[in-house]
Amino acid sequence: MSRVSLVVVGAGLRGQAYAERAVTSGGARIVAVAEPDEGRRERFAERYDVPHAFADWTELAAAGKLADAAIIATPDRHHTGPAVALAGLGYHLLAEKPLAPTEDDAERIAEAVERTGVLFAVCHVLRYTPYTRVLKELLDADRIGEVVSVQHLEPVGWWHQAHSFVRGEWSNSRTSSPMLLAKACHDLDWLLYVMGRPVRRVSSFGRLTHFRPSSRPAEAADRCLDCPLQTTCAYSATRLYFDCLGDPEREFWPLSAVTADHTVEGVREALRTGPYGRCVYDSDNDVVDHQVVSLEFADGATGSFTMTAFTPFELRKTRLFGTQGYLEGDGVTLRIVDFRTGAEETVVTADASLSADHSDGDHELVDRFLAAVGSGDGSRLDSDTASALAGHRVVWAAERARRSGTVVELR
């Protein structure tokens, strides 16, 4: 199988992460990048020795088909144009989540993929972790009988909420996406995948409680650099970003979202002039900082999902309640209790030090996408347009339920 040729649309952190895996695994070579930020575009082209660099995806599309496949990693609201155009040119597509902020745009992408017959996967990477694979195998082997209820927690992390969803790109639903779509579409897609059945009804509650002017201490300054509370505030930008310096992983993320100049002077300038130096109680954010979703599946099984900012930055926690057993997991370790025998078993699915985030899922998805493109075998992928739309529709239903205070029934 020859190496797959790739174009990358959007050279931000996610585009860089997928490109890095594609190249270092030996599975692909990158022949073009489309990125409006000149500095980012030039750094990406130099890093991967890319022969074609475009300022916009429309320029890339106008050049015709340059590669086998495309990675779509633009901001959420800019997925539809490049996805539809590149599918029309015959590119196989790996699209960052969410597929699109609206159902109409998501359906446009799905229709283009189905009409052209290209291979497609949305980056719901939680499906592709070793932990998920083992959990699914246990459920499919009837280890806990019929699953009648599930509880799932996404612990966003206090500083992650402040970084991405208060100061960062996904802070405002009018310019990006609602919190549930921007962050938790991973989780609702994963719940549908694990449960293996569609959702029938949804209700939801949540709000922006803490990160708002009414919570601001009287002594707080508009910028963390000027604030007398910066040494004690849990959400201090100075503490978060200066502490990233010297740590390669934390310099890549979260610091690279703040500035490309990884020096004390560079960070100071970014916090003085950019959005990441603002007080968390005086930003333009409107997305919720906690939300619960109640689910009724088509067979009557029930589920609850909680997303909250007010946690450590950790892996998801899940409990599955079956007629013959109980299973709980933390993203690495699974505990199974068998009601029939009373026996209890613990299964370690991965090295905890390698699973601090979902990078194992990122890598597996990229590897499988490249293998699918190289072989023409779409069965190597665990997601497609239908499954992506199903999870997104639950998210949109939950948002309608939260805003209206009603129970929403899905088609």
Image (cartoon, rainbow, N blue to C red):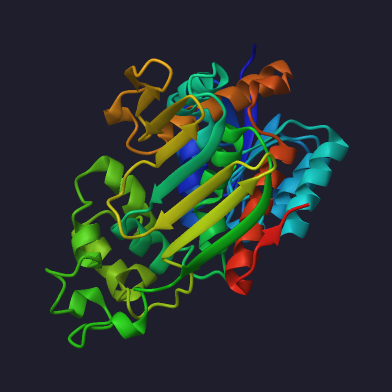
Residue occupying the far top of the picture? 1
Is 335 situated left or right of 292 in this image? left
Which residue occupies 39% across, 77% down? Answer: 283
Residue occupying the far bottom of the picture? 218
Which residue occupies 53% across, 58% down? Answer: 180
Question: x and y percent of residue 350 in the render?
Answer: 35, 23
Q: Is residue 137 above or below residue 231?
A: above
Residue closest to the eye, 293 or 30: 293
Is 351 situated left or right of 299 in this image? left
Q: Is residue 398 above or below residue 384?
A: below
Which residue occupies 34% across, 73% down? Answer: 210
Which residue occupies 67% across, 19% down? Answer: 374
Question: x and y percent of residue 163 in the render?
Answer: 35, 61
Q: Is residue 44 visible?
A: no
Quarter of the view holding residue 213: bottom left
Q: How many marks do you count on the picture?
A: 0
Residue closest to the eye, 327 or 223: 327
Quarter of the view holding residue 331: top left
Q: Is residue 394 above or below residue 220?
A: above
Residue closest to the eye, 353 or 60: 353
Question: x and y percent of residue 108 in the render?
Answer: 80, 52
Question: x and y percent of residue 227 in the render?
Answer: 18, 79
Q: Is residue 4 above or below residue 90?
A: above
Q: Which quarter of the image is occupied by the N terminus?
A: top right
Q: Is residue 324 visible?
A: yes
Residue occupying the far right of the picture? 115
Is 318 situated left or right of 387 in this image? left
Residue closest to the eye, 82 or 314: 314
